[in-house]
Amino acid sequence: MSDVGSMTSRPPPASPATSVLATLGRLAVSVLIPAVAFLVLRQGFLFLRDSNAPKVLIVVVAVLWGVGGIGLLYWVGNWVVERMPKRIGARILPFVFVGPGVAILIWYLALPVARTFWSSLKDAKSAGFVGLDNFAFVFTDASMLTTFRNNLLWMVVGTLFSVALGLLVAVLADRSRFERTAKALIFLPMAISFVGAGVIWNFMYEIRDVSEPQIGLLNAIWVGLLGNEPQAWTALNQPWNNLFLIFIVIWLQSGFAMVLFSAAIKGVPTDQLEASRVDGATEVQTFFRIVMPAIWGTVVTVATTIVIFTLKIFDVVWVMTGGQFGTDVIATQFFRQFFVANQNGRGSAIAVVLLLAVVPVMIYNLRQFSKRETF
């Protein structure tokens, strides 16, 4: 009898049409509530932007509103998904949490790239369509060819010496009792911005009239100790002035390379090192036959990272020379064409070329990370 009573007390099963309507209603609510929360968040930022309140107060409220609003947005999205059918909620939940990040990447990265490419096919005022004329300028103009040569020089010399010096310091300091002090001194330039480094080395390369004392360290040595005429080091003939600029990046990036190499070297199994020494191998042989193969993935990763950086170099060149005396690189040429000469089409074409040059190296770098199971 109890079974019969329980069966009679159960509600009748919902019809397929009712289930579909309920599911559609829940989906609509799952879209509507986050959309409303996003609009409320946006209105808050618009209100702060147009507010006449003190700047400090606006900054504090904006930070609290932004962090709290984003947290609220995710909480609302999760709350809605939890009230949906499990099968549908399990499929939607990843999009709720990953979706905003993907939307930000599309809005601030993918769309600007597409707009830049479209602008590169137009004239200086982005009004008329000129096809590939801007790219023809990029690959045929004499100043652009000098720019590509300079970037190649930055890539080869800057990367080679940064990696070599970082690896040398990491190996030598590994057994020194002054390891921490030495590494701290080498890593210290990493705390300086590239603009700050350019200002510092401007003083190092400073030139004064022959009748005045040389306050630049390099000219002070060149004149005071060696008795030569003062030199404008960053205005010398090619490629020497570029090499003086590249040295600044070597000074900055060697510490970065050293830290990663030092960590990789300490991860080499000590039993392999001891076995090679017992077998009579010299330290040089041990380094090249045991250590280098073990840390080769780190060497490749550091080298490709510095290559990407040298491809995009801008700050040091602009602060030191402004791209004059044949020291232009791709980024400074982009700035000059787009913002100084108001050549929107040419500037966009240069930006596209820079992107195309960086992407293959970046993909290779990510593959190396993937092979080492970094992420």
Image (spheres, rainbow, N blue to C red):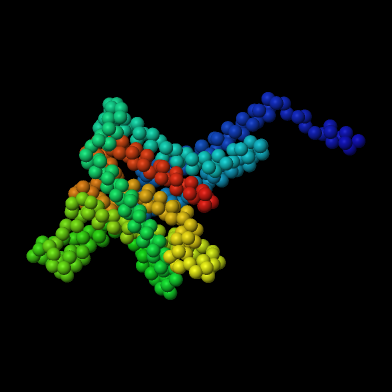
Give above or below for 101 relative to 271: above
Which residue is at 54% across, 43% downward? 97
Write down the quadrant of residue 20 in the picture.
top right
Q: Quadrant of the N terminus?
A: top right
Q: Report if residue 192 is visible in the image.
A: no
| Viewer-side residue, 273 vs 111 | 273
Q: Nearer the viewer, residue 210 or 119?
A: 210
Residue located farthest toward the top when viewing the structure as drawn: 17
| Picture layout, residue 127 above or below residue 51 | above
Q: Residue at x 51, y 62 (%)?
A: 268
Q: Is residue 206 visible?
A: yes
Please name the residue shown 51% across and 66% down the image. 276
Whole-percent x and y of residue 71? 52, 48
Residue at x 77% of width, y 29% of height: 12
Q: Is residue 339 left or right of residue 162?
A: left
Q: Is residue 228 above or below residue 96?
A: below
Say whether residue 348 is left or right of residue 11.
left
Whether residue 132 sits left or right of residue 17 in the image: it is left
User: Is 336 displayed left or right of 51 in the figure?
Assistant: left
Please provide percent x and percent y for residue 122. 29, 29
